[in-house]
Image (cartoon, rainbow, N blue to C red):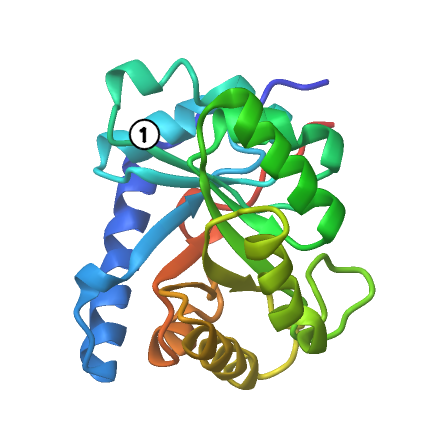
Amino acid sequence: MTDLPSPDADAIAANLARIKARIAEACDKAGRDPAGVTLVAVSKTHPAGAVRAALAAGQSVFGENRVQEAAGKFPELRPDHPAMRLHIIGGLQTNKARDAVRVADVIESLDRPKLAAAIAEAIRKEGRAPGLLVQVNTGAEPQKSGVARDEASAFLRQCREEHGLAISGLMCIPPEGEDPTPHFRWLAELAAREGLGILSMGMSSDFEAAIACGATQLRVGSAIFGARPYPA
């Protein structure tokens, strides 16, 4: 395995400033307050040094795909950064539910009954309850996680009534190459019907469209940290 390059703290800070300026501009066009939109800096595969650089530049909310990777980066940072928040945004295996509940402040990828049961049990055992978002597979893509559109409302009821979970919002990843706006609008309509206030939608390539559709959380990685460094 080769060593990963040291993160460029100045570049990360400059990228964050550009993204925040674009968020503010998109919010202005949509008639929204930028304070109502949270930037989740997706640090998956990037070293802890990149997270430290983003923290130094004022970023406090981060997203990771894999629980094991998150557990290796973030616990040591928390004592010096009590306002930091960690979101698990990748597909979550049931046998990692307790680890996720232990390390995360928000789990965005709740998408099936077995995982709901595992998270509920983990919450009871750990005595802490991260925020929970239900991921919806708005494009019906077989390779992606997420509950199907026509099953989303029933799954939300099951999470609440059968497992006692407090669901705070929804997440989606529109199909690559498609106009994301119909997917964002559909998710926003579902959230409104279900009384959910958090909409995690929009990434580096489409977050302005997501803001126009009501996104409250944006997951931006490469536009902040650069291309993901996959070790050889």
In the rendered image, residue 17, in percent from the top left (x then y), is placed at 23, 51
In the rendered image, residue 126, in percent from the top left (x then y), is placed at 52, 21
The answer to whether residue 66 is seen in the rendering is no
Q: Is residue 61 above or below residue 21?
A: above
Q: Of helix, strand and loop, which one carries label 1?
A: helix
Instruction: Please report the residue visible at 60 percent of the width from the left and 40 percent of the height from the top.
Output: 65
In the rendered image, residue 92, in percent from the top left (x then y), is placed at 68, 41
Instruction: Please report the residue visible at 27 percent of the width from the left and 66 percent of the height from the top.
Output: 22
Residue flagged by tag 1: what amino acid is it? Answer: Ala
Q: Is residue 142 above or below residue 119?
A: below
Image quarter of residue 196:
bottom left
User: Is residue 16 shown left or right of residue 6?
Assistant: left
Residue identified by numbered label 1 = 53
In the displayed image of the protein, which residue is found farthest to the right? 142
Near-viewer residue (17 or 62)? 62
Instruction: Give the quadrant of the C terminus.
Output: top right
User: Is residue 12 shown left or right of residue 219?
Assistant: left
Instruction: Give the quadrant of the N terminus.
Output: top right
Instruction: Please report the residue visible at 36 percent of the width from the left and 65 percent of the height from the top.
Output: 197
Q: Is residue 181 above or below residue 123?
A: below
In the rendered image, residue 173, in percent from the top left (x then y), is placed at 59, 65
Instruction: Please report the residue visible at 52 percent of the width from the left and 47 percent of the height from the top.
Output: 165
Q: Residues within 10 Å of mark 1 (few under 14, many from 20)?
A: some
